């Protein structure tokens, strides 16, 4: 049995908990949190410990799955804990992945562990699709569309606006752009032409709706470059119609071989973004533990890990039934 620990217990941590408990070859040894362990109740009844107790579990857990945020948690935590354990994270700040990879690689090699980073669906499964599509169809263009789904980061950004009580933000692909790509036209698309953003906002009592809408639409790095629609709704409507965390998207590559055109597509439609991401992390936790058992060490991405390490099934089964 592969012994797994979870560091962080938000929506993603709960998703990993479900995936580990559903795996026949895994055992959950505990959840580690910065909150009070006594006040943290897990869905499955798994034991909860303080992150301050992590060092006591060195040698008792085969792999730790880190479920913190990419902004501040993972840049510090993954390298730190890679010195003690095999680790897996879902670091998704694309521009900073090379720096993160180098830091985790140094720490993991020093500790003799494996660190699988940036594992999820983007980066992660979508990254694999882009790589494979480009390798088999070198004369072409990649297009990635996200949604329709809730962006947790953008929703949090709205909630930081003065006068906002709660909010959900949906990323929505522009159908005209999707259709143009699928037609084989290989269009040049700007950020604004690919996606729109829909915001559902609950105002604080007495808040200036016009000022809130203006601040949202002008927010750099989040909304300023997109066609953005803001809907003001009641707290009851938000809870009733926007409580879930669906997401998804698709990677396309349009290209040619000689005179012939081809379109490759990989898509996801997810009822729960954190539960699905938790399942991806769990599969790569299995891979990290297996690679470490073979004597491998250092940081790895989805490009470095052979698919067979992800499956509960052995190589003979995979060759006989899935090849």
Image (tube, rainbow, N blue to C red):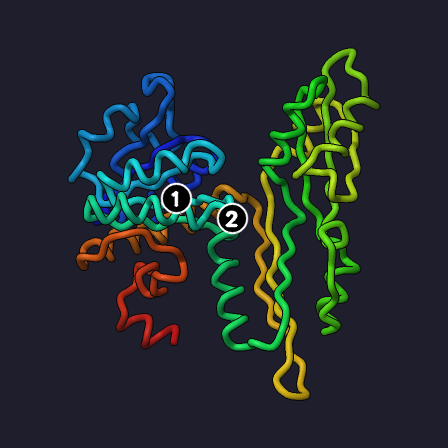
Q: Residue reaching furthest right?
A: 210
Q: Which residue is mark 1?
A: 89
- Left or right of 277? Residue 83 is left
Give the residue at x 28% y 28%. 47
Relative to residue 320, is residue 120 depicted above or below? Answer: above
Q: Which residue is mark 2?
A: 94
The percent coordinates of residue 171 (x first, y second) are 68, 45
Q: Nearer the viewer, residue 55 or 319?
A: 55
Are dots 2 and 1 in contact, CB under 8 Å?
no
Relative to residue 295, is residue 65 depicted above or below? Answer: above
The percent coordinates of residue 320 (x first, y second) are 32, 77
- Left or right of 179? Residue 140 is left
| Crowdedness near tag 2: few (<14), some (14–19) or many (≥20) residues, C-alpha within 10 Å | few
| Crowdedness near tag 1: few (<14), some (14–19) or many (≥20) residues, C-alpha within 10 Å | many
- Left or right of 51? Residue 264 is right
Quadrant location, the C terminus: bottom left
Residue 104: which disc? none
The percent coordinates of residue 289 (x first, y second) are 25, 51
Earlier sequence position, callout 2 versus callout 1: 1
């Amino acid at each position: 049995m592969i012994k797994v620990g979870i560091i962080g217990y938000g929506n993603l941590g709960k998703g990993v908990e479900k995936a580990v408990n559903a795996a026949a070859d895994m055992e959950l040894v505990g959840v580690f949190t910065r909150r009070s362990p006594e006040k943290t109740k897990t869905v499955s009844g798994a034991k909860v410990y303080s992150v301050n107790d992590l060092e006591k579990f060195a040698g008792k857990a085969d792999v730790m799955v880190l479920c913190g945020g990419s902004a501040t948690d993972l840049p510090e935590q993954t390298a730190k804990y890679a010195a003690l354990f095999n680790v897996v994270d879902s670091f998704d700040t694309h521009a900073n992945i090379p720096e993160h990879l180098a830091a985790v690689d140094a720490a993991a090699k020093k500790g003799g562990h494996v660190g699988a980073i940036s594992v999820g669906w983007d980066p992660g499964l979508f990254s694999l699709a882009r790589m494979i599509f480009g390798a088999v169809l070198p004369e072409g263009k990649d297009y990635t569309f996200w949604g329709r789904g809730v962006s947790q980061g953008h929703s949090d950004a709205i909630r930081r606006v003065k006068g906002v009580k709660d909010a959900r933000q949906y990323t929505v692909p522009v159908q005209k752009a999707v259709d143009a790509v699928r037609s084989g036209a290989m269009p040049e698309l700007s950020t604004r032409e690919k996606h729109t953003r829909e915001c559902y906002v609950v105002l604080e009592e007495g808040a200036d709706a016009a000022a809130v809408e203006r601040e949202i639409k002008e927010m750099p790095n989040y909304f300023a470059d997109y066609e953005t629609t803001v809907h003001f709704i009641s707290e009851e409507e938000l809870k009733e119609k926007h409580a879930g965390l669906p997401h998804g998207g698709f990677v396309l590559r349009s290209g040619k071989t000689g005179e012939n055109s081809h379109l490759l597509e990989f898509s996801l439609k997810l009822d729960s973004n954190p539960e699905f991401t938790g399942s991806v992390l769990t599969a790569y936790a299995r891979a990290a533990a297996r690679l470490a058992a073979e004597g491998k060490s250092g940081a790895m991405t989805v490009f470095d890990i052979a698919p067979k390490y992800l499956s509960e099934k052995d190589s003979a089964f995979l060759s006989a039934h899935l090849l």
